[in-house]
Image (cartoon, rainbow, N blue to C red):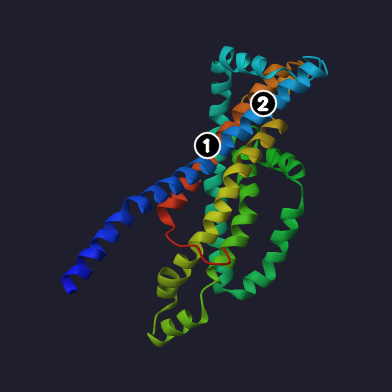
Amino acid sequence: MASGIGLAKISLAQSETPDRRAKWLAARRRAAWARFGLPLVGAATLLILWWAVIYLFKVKPFIAPAPEVVAQTLIAKFDVLASNLLPTAIEAVCGFLVGNIAAIVIATLFVHRKMLELAFFPLVVLFNSVPVVAKAPILVLLLGNGMAPKIAIAAVVCFFPTLVNMVRGLEAVSPQSMELMHVLSASRWEIFIRLRLPTSVPYLFSALKIAASTAVVGAIVGEWIGSQEGIGALIIQATYNFDSALLYATVVCGSVFSVAFFLAVRLAERLCVRWIPKGA
């Protein structure tokens, strides 16, 4: 009798296994479609709408070129676009590193020295409220026309979101965990390394993904103020020459790099973050 029941359970499990696997594969396909297919559909829809507006309303080429004209410009002037993208990429990546490292260090000081936070955080908020286009000329005057002011502008743009998120992450430790560390006589350094820092990592990557895009914007804005090369300088040149095809191609080039930078940070997040707290 027992053996019969056991055989029945085995046969039932074997009959359910293919069905469960089929459902699992279907769920994986739906997830892959939602992750990769829908963005492609959205991009294709935008291109079709762009093309339709150009040809239905007969928009002049110097105002807005057709998508195929932009594609031709991307191919024909690839060397020019690539040579100007390189300095912008260097400025954005360096500004990203400088701004975020400074934000992490200052956030650590704010968490461990509340008097510093009370004294200087309002000043940080005040400085952040000044538009980038107003801060950029000052930095160019102070640092010259090289890469230094562009890196500084990109760093300034990245700094505030990372500072706010890092402070929140370092303070997001549960009271129970903090009490346990005190019971174990953990030092402030041990609490920071073993408790505060791991808790803050999801918050940090939330800010880094924002900073990955804004760093590129900061570098381009810095090039608008004064530069002979870079995506920003090429945008100004194309605008003055009424070369709308080159202008759109330059914008596409900068946007592609910004998306690639964002995806690189997101990949790093997947490798580093194994859990995400509720408030992150």
User: Residue drawn at (58%, 12%), measured in percent from left and top?
Assistant: 76
User: Residue drawn at (53%, 35%), measured in percent from left and top?
Assistant: 90
Q: Residue 112 in the image: x percent, y percent?
A: 54, 73
Which residue, given by chain and number where applicable, does mark 1 sit on? 260
Q: Is residue 88 left or right of residue 15?
A: right
Q: Identity of the amino acid at label 2? A: Leu
Q: In what element is the residue under mark 2?
A: helix
Structural crowding at the residue carrying mark 2, measured as other residues with C-alpha within 10 Å and reported as few (<14), some (14–19) or many (≥20): some
In which quadrant is the C terminus drawn? Answer: bottom right
User: Residue drawn at (62%, 24%), measured in percent from left and top?
Assistant: 229
Q: How many marks?
A: 2
In which quadrant is the N terminus drawn? Answer: bottom left
Q: Residue 11 in the image: x percent, y percent?
A: 25, 59
Q: Nearer the viewer, residue 49 or 232?
A: 49
Q: In what element is the residue under mark 1?
A: helix
Q: Earlier in the sequence, mark 1 or mark 2?
A: 2
Q: Residue 222 in the image: x percent, y percent?
A: 67, 36
Q: Residue 22 in the image: x percent, y percent?
A: 38, 47
Residue 146 seen anywhere in this rendered image of the structure:
no
User: Residue drawn at (59%, 56%), measured in percent from left and top?
Assistant: 162
Which residue, given by chain and number where applicable, does mark 2 sit on? 47
